[in-house]
Image (spheres, rainbow, N blue to C red):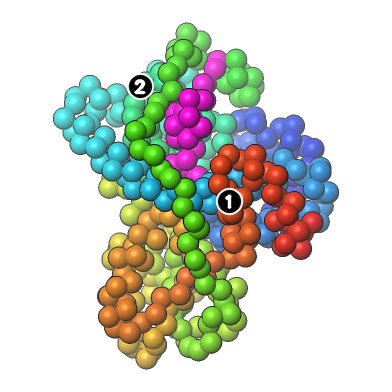
């Protein structure tokens, strides 16, 4: 972030859309894996940016930081989207098991063997590096859905299994947006001219792309709900067990006093019923081990027994963790909480101020969030 802060102004605005390949990433920060796990927080990124540039000069970069908050907040308001995606994914995996043509086309796509210029390179880059430029993600998803006619859920799952910054909200909603489901009837169409321009002619899939597309649709109406209540650090008064998860690896910095004990828990394998990419798995595992400084890290998707055992060992009745937004961590904690309560153990999820003030602006499209950004920055003392 210190290296990139100078480039978050006009230079970023002019150059951010260019995908120049994995060896040339100086036009983007590539910080998303660290921000996703909150090894560096949105507030820290905004603070570093606005020390160097005015909000007006760094407005585009600031908006990009808030896109992640927007997706998380929107999914918190519409939590039924996540289980619907998971159910759809399971159906498509079963369909691929039965349909040889679908299975073959799917296998070719994830192996980068479709023959489509650019698409195959991005598939291999994703698996090989755990990262893709945001513009390439949009092109890839559009080609996957509208040219290859593959189920969007399988594509979203492919990304979530391999991206180091694999985030349930950002990933799921971005794929829905490209498909024309999220912003109903308005799909994102990958075009040769756009790909050629913003890859500086590295790729030009002439006569290979379908540009006459029909947006996808869904029958479920995901009604908006009130944001869930969340705790603040002021509620922590006694000794506690700190549970570090993938959703916030630096939550301890927000707490009033150190924990009596600490434990880490990985949820990577819960991202998908299919195997997780080695790079994404290694990144998350290494990050949480750094954050936990040598203490135990749970590496399965059932945390209850280990949490209870650790609490009993240290005679603790309170577990504190970072707030888990809609996704695998939230699901695992929801499954664990009844057993914890039976043992007289209270689970407290601490939501950061940034989320609390940003998420209420994520009720409709990003425009409403954009209008609220100055208010959020003012609340954070960054205006």
Residue farthest to the left, as pictured: 98
Magenta extent: 169-192
- Residue at (68, 35) in percent of width and height: 16
The quarter of the rendered structure image containing the C terminus is bottom right
- Residue at (16, 30) in percent of width and height: 98
The quarter of the rendered structure image containing the N terminus is bottom right
Q: For the residues carrying marks 2 and 1, which lies nearer the camera in this image?
A: 1
Q: Secondary structure at mark 1?
A: helix
In the image, 94: left or right of 88?
Answer: left
In the image, 276: left or right of 26?
Answer: left
The residue where tag 2 is placed is 149
Q: Position of residue 127 (x, y in %)?
A: 42, 39
Q: Position of residue 129 (x, y in %)?
A: 48, 42
- Residue at (47, 35) in percent of width and height: 182
First of labels 2, 1 by sequence position: 1
- Along the line of sight, the residue nearer the viewer: 68 or 143: 68
């Amino acid at each position: 972030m210190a290296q990139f802060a100078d480039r978050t102004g006009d230079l970023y605005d002019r150059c951010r859309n260019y995908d120049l390949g994995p060896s040339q990433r100086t036009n983007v920060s590539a910080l998303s894996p660290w921000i996703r796990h909150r090894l560096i927080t949105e507030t820290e990124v905004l603070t570093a940016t606005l020390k160097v540039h005015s909000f007006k000069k760094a407005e585009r970069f600031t908006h990009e930081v808030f896109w992640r908050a927007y997706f998380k907040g929107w999914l918190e308001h519409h939590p039924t989207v996540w289980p619907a995606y998971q159910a759809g994914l399971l159906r498509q995996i079963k369909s691929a098991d039965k349909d040889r043509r679908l299975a073959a086309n799917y296998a070719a796509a994830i192996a980068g063997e479709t023959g489509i210029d650019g698409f195959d390179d991005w598939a291999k880059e994703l698996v090989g590096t755990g990262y893709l430029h945001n513009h390439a993600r949009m092109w890839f998803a559009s080609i996957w859905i509208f040219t290859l006619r593959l189920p969007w859920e399988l594509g979203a799952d492919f990304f979530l299994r391999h991206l180091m910054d694999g985030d349930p909200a950002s990933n799921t909603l971005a794929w829905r947006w490209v498909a024309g489901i999220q912003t109903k009837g308005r799909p994102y169409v990958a075009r040769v001219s756009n790909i050629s321009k913003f890859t500086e002619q590295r790729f030009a899939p002439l006569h290979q792309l379908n540009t006459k597309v029909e947006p996808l649709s869904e029958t479920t109406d995901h009604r908006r709900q009130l944001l869930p209540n969340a705790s603040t650090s002021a509620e922590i008064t006694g000794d506690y067990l700190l549970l570090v998860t993938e959703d916030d690896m630096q939550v301890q910095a927000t707490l009033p006093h150190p924990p009596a004990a600490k434990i880490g828990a990985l949820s990577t394998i819960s991202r998908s019923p299919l195997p997780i990419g080695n790079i994404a798995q290694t990144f998350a595992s290494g990050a949480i081990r750094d954050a936990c400084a040598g203490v135990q890290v749970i590496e399965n998707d059932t945390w209850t027994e280990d949490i209870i055992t650790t609490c009993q060992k240290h005679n603790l009745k309170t577990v504190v963790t970072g707030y888990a937004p809609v996704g695998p961590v939230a699901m695992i904690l929801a499954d664990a909480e009844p057993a914890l309560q039976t043992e007289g153990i209270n689970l407290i999820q601490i939501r950061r101020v940034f989320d609390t003030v940003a998420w209420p602006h994520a009720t409709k499209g990003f425009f409403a969030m954009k209008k609220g950004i100055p208010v959020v920055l003012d609340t954070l003392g960054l205006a």
